[in-house]
Amino acid sequence: MNAFSRRGACPALSAPMQTGDGLLVRLNPVAGGLAPKSLTGLCESALRHGNGIMEVTARGSLQIRGLTAESARLLAAEVDALGIAVRTGVPVETGPLAGIDPQEIADPRPLAERIRAAIEEAGLTARLGPKVSVVIDGGGQLAMDALTADVRLKAVRAGAAIQWRVSIAGDARSAKPLATVDGDAARDIAVAALRMVAEKGREAHTRDLTKRQLASLAGWHSFAPPSVLPDISPSRGEIELSPSVSPISNAESEEPARELPISPLEGEMSGRTEGGAVERPRSTLGLFNLNNGHAIGIALPFGSMPAQNLIDLASQASNLDVIEIRLAPGRALLLLGLSPSACLSLQATASTLGFVTSPADPRTRIAACPGTPACASGRIATRAIAETVAAESADLLDPSLTLHISGCAKGCAHPGPAALTLVGDENGAGLVVDGTAKALPAGYRPGYDAARGIGGVLAAMRAQRHPGETVAACLTRLGTAGIAELYRRN
């Protein structure tokens, strides 16, 4: 396996990754977004050097497909000539409306820059795996709750002051809370956690930290810049805490920690309640009021769109005086600097071009990876199946149901469990009920006929669902074997 196809790699502009339709590169602009003219130039470059397919990932990165080793170098040179600076190193991610959202608790960008600088100064980039990341959420209209990260920082109000709630290993619902501290301490905890991970090797994540290491982080106070903090690992010693600082400071186990205790204050601030309920985040789609003007959010269907469609969108955006186009989590774009009427005009253009413009669009309930032939690992034509299901079974796709269509068992488009998952393997299109693409399918049918099978399952669920019954309860009542039988026979 060469460097282009190594699993777990991140296909940065300088390190393309081999896929079924050639090399793939991924980039994130340093400035946070692109001018319409710059996006047009990038798409034209993709048409010249790739297969003309552009993607926005679930984390809000831009991907260009179908490159060769030589054309990838030419693309990189043209990105340089366009003046598009792209981020490198450990991803330290902020929200797509960072610094321009009137509802934001704090602008996360200064803290993000300090953490990036500290990571570089500590020499951690080369020692951490490509999937290690930090998320810094300043609050506001678009939360980053759905993104998983090794370290999460969330702005919270503490009287007149702003503090940062620090947690590790997960999304907003599953991450383990450590402490709520000021910006300096938050930076120190984040970098110290990454040092601990680096000591364990490039395959490690914060989920691999021991209870004692988590106790050290939970009781941290800002007392030294991260560049002079000692490497912290079981072999190098750890910061000792007084019992009053952390409720788990006496934990001696070196096994990875399963859970951290949550103080009543942190439990309230994190939105955790009995049963783990969290506030439903706002969709990236629609109109947003900003500090200076308005923005419209649209999405690429299943994260993919021909470059020419993006060029046409950017042209209309330029005509309407859009100042910036930002990539956003959820495979979306935010077009900034519009009047309300211009937002509606651009939304109509985007809809005509095939973009997703409404949260009610059935395509928003389907996660689909590129599949075959785009990906070498794909066994089924995922996007074709997804489009057919969205077109023929739109009225059956309940808003609370997630359908995942995966070309293989890696499940790149939706790593977590879904109500229904189609996964391609040597037997065809397998159906997994309430699980991930890695689970053993309960039933199969040919890949070319998978959309009809899913349509039958959805129709049966609609007909047999009791009034007021949730999708999850209906799935449980029908049973995995019953749903698999519906999938096979319809």
Image (cartoon, rainbow, N blue to C red):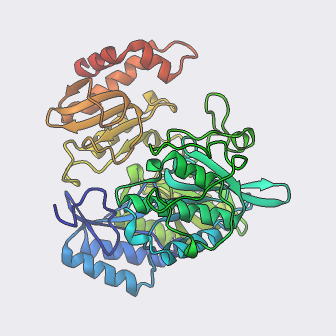
Quadrant in the picture for the C terminus: top left
Q: Position of residue 398 (x, y in %)?
A: 48, 29
Q: Tell me if residue 355 can be seen.
A: yes
- Left/right placement of residue 157 relative to residue 58 reads right
* Snapshot quadrant of residue 477: top left
Q: Position of residue 60 (x, y in %)?
A: 47, 59
Residue that sits furthest to the right in the current view: 160
Q: Quadrant of the N terminus?
A: bottom left
| Number of numbered discs on residues | 0
Query: Residue at horizontal 19%, vertical 57%?
Result: 20
Q: Residue furthest toward the bottom?
A: 81
Report the front residue among 25 and 225: 225
Task: Inspect this view and state whether residue 94 appears.
Answer: no
Q: Examine the rendered structure and indicate whether residue 242 appears above or below residue 81.
A: above
Q: Nearer the viewer, residue 297 or 188?
A: 188
Compared across the picture, whether 466 is left or right of 64 comes to: right
Q: Position of residue 65 (x, y in %)?
A: 28, 64
Q: Where 92 sits versus 246, above or below?
A: below
Q: Residue at x 31, y 29 (%)?
A: 432
> Would residue 306 be found to the left or right of residue 265 on screen?
left
What residue do we see at 29% from left, 45% from top?
410
Measured from the top left, where is residue 483 in percent x and y? 33, 18
Q: Considering depth in this image, is 433 or 355 the residue closer to the camera?
A: 433
